[in-house]
Amino acid sequence: GSAVVFAGATVLIALIGLSFANIPFLTTMGIAASVAVAIAVAIAVTLTPAFLGFVKGRVAGWPRRRKVTRRRRGTSAREDAAALAEAASEADAEPEAEPAPATAHRKKTNPWVKLVTRHPVVTTVSVVALLGALAIPAGSLPLALPNAGMLPEDNEARQSYDLVAEHFGAGANGPLIMTGTIVTSTDPLTLMQDLGDDIATIPGVKEVALATPNRTADTGIVQIVPETAPDDPATAELVRELRSQHDRLLDEYGVDLKVTGFTAVAIDISDRLGGALLPFGIFVVGLSLVLLTIVFRSIWVPLKAAAGYLLSVAAAFGIVALVFEWGVFADALHVSKTGPVISFMPIILMGVLFGLAMDYEVFLVSRMREDYVHLRRARGGRADRATAISAVRSGFTASARVVTAAAVIMFAVFAAFVPEGDINIKPIALGLAAGIAIDAFLVRMTLVPAVMTLLGQHAWWMPRWMHRVLPHFDVEGEAVERELSLKDWPKSDRIAAVAAEDLDLLAYGSTHGGDVDVFAGVTTRVEFGDTVIVTGDPRASRALLLTIAGRLAPTGGRLRVAGHLLPERAAWVRSQVGVALLADADDPLAELARALRGSALIVVIDGLGRLEGQATRDQAAALLRDAAVARRERFDDAHSPLTILASTQHEGSALSLMADAHRAGVHSLALPTRLHTPVPASAEEHA
């Protein structure tokens, strides 16, 4: 479901971005298509699972018949079953060959990614140089709206176009019109004649075919035949020159002239589409950076993805220019005439290729990230270059076939329109086919693993403040998979307030010179109504409480709070667990009162030592008693379900406070008195 939502979001970004062209039909098309995409996403995550629920296991087809091995003579069915059970137990007891669960089933590394990761510098330089060379022709790619001159030579409209150009000049196929109000003129005929003679002297004008007032003599019309064809860049320059003469003609003749006609309108649309490319690119690339940063929890991965997308787009534009402007392979692709391509090609190509490129990026890199996390945990939290490269190879091997299949399908769809398609569709189809092939095979499946190898473990770096601010987005559905696998944990007849097993929190790349175990191997069960006093290093105690409150994500182990699995249900836990950070509060009593206010059944309190003085402690005990009574009355329970987890460095003082608060079921949880640094990553690399 998360992957579907992300894929839909990337397409929505591209479609909504079409409004930057400020062309009504493009905006309408983008909005309508985005609504359709949103509906499709909603159906995929709602109706599709519901329908699958009706058919259940039959959706995968009929199960294959299993061969039944005949029992040995002299053995009973019960003995065979016992033997099978014993064999299964032995298989479960054997250690896995691979350290990471995600990669245990991948025995053979893809030879292509092995080659790429062995020579990352050569690969990166070669791909960038090749794509840069392909992008060079894009600088001279002319854009225009289609006309009859682009049709095949055997088409009657094309033949008429060529005959007009031959006998009357190329500009006769696209005359320009200038109109203006002449209602104040006393001699409109002479005025228009003089105006026509003046315009005829402007460079690029072959002739003024008509300069006359209309029948009511309130509007003047000037018909101009350019020297060049409608799609010639010189004609666009002539339109700009005529408009630049507006103020001079207004001063001399008193006529407010406007340049119009089909040719001028086509030029205006092309200019508007060309001017929209930069803001459109900034919009889609900017939002892609935000989305990918959220998904991959990295700075370099989104930047790499955006740079790869821009390389693919530039190279695709260059290939279109090579064929339709320079004429390379034009005959082989049945291009009837070289010259400008349809103005809508760039923005459509950028939009479609953006959605596909981001999907390919997620297919590949999300699996690399998943394997990196598993490998890192399996190796005791070690973050080194070898771990990162192993994740790149295993992730690529697992997802390369999916990307290849998706790219080949889309390439075949668009490539089919190139040799025999309409002349207006051909450049779009060629650009998309080339862009998809380049992005999938050169950028995502060659450049990406090479760059990821060069970055190593630094590819997954993100500032801590950004990690805290950005929301978590589970694009691969790991959260759902984990919840399903742990649905029966812990085995108990009733829900515990807190259940933890081998809970770990690792501070990666800390200022202590390497990765630091904030706490490790915490196993506990806290029933509703109990009180737990946490002692040990203040930082570890605080981190444990914040992890239980859903403010920090554990790096290992299992944790449920009020039946909700963490970190998957952290949003619910944050809204239902009260937090009192007395160590940071200016007024500890006010902070405690705020946390106990409301109906939260679980409250974590950090820094009980801040409650100094007997009077302060008495008030704190009263607050705890009142909160317990309020919960008991609210839930009509003989025993108050209020659960307290508090940290302190003075266990005796904390126990005394809880006794004054009439707290029963008080337990202690001791954490290490100092943080543990396993081995700095740099030391391992030098070793």
Image (spheres, rainbow, N blue to C red):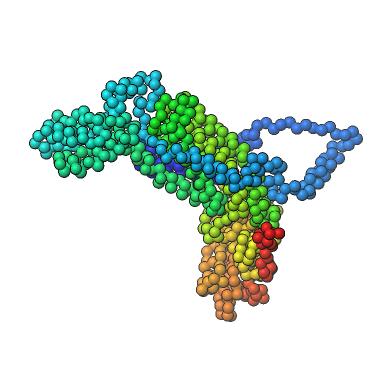
* Residue 554 on image: x %, y %: 63, 58
Residue lying furthest left? 186
Left or right position of 255 against 593: left
Q: Residue 202 vs residue 117: left or right?
A: left
- Whether residue 358 is visible to the viewer of this picture, yes or no, is no
* Residue nearest the viewer, comparing 321 with 666: 321
Q: Nearer the viewer, residue 565 or 190?
A: 190
* Residue lying farthest to the bottom in this orientation: 614
**Above or below: residue 303 compared with residue 544:** above
Decide: is 570 above or below 349. below
Query: Total of numbered circles in the picture?
Result: 0
Compared to residue 296, the image places residue 549 above or below, namely below
Q: Is residue 203 left or right of residue 107?
A: left
| Residue at the image point whose x is 69% and y is 32% from the top | 63
Quarter occupied by residue 625? bottom right
Q: Residue at x 18, y 31 (%)?
A: 211
Quadrant where the N terminus sits is top right
Give residue 306's position: percent from left, percent from top: 50, 47
Pinpoint residue 25: horizontal percent, then vertical percent: 36, 36
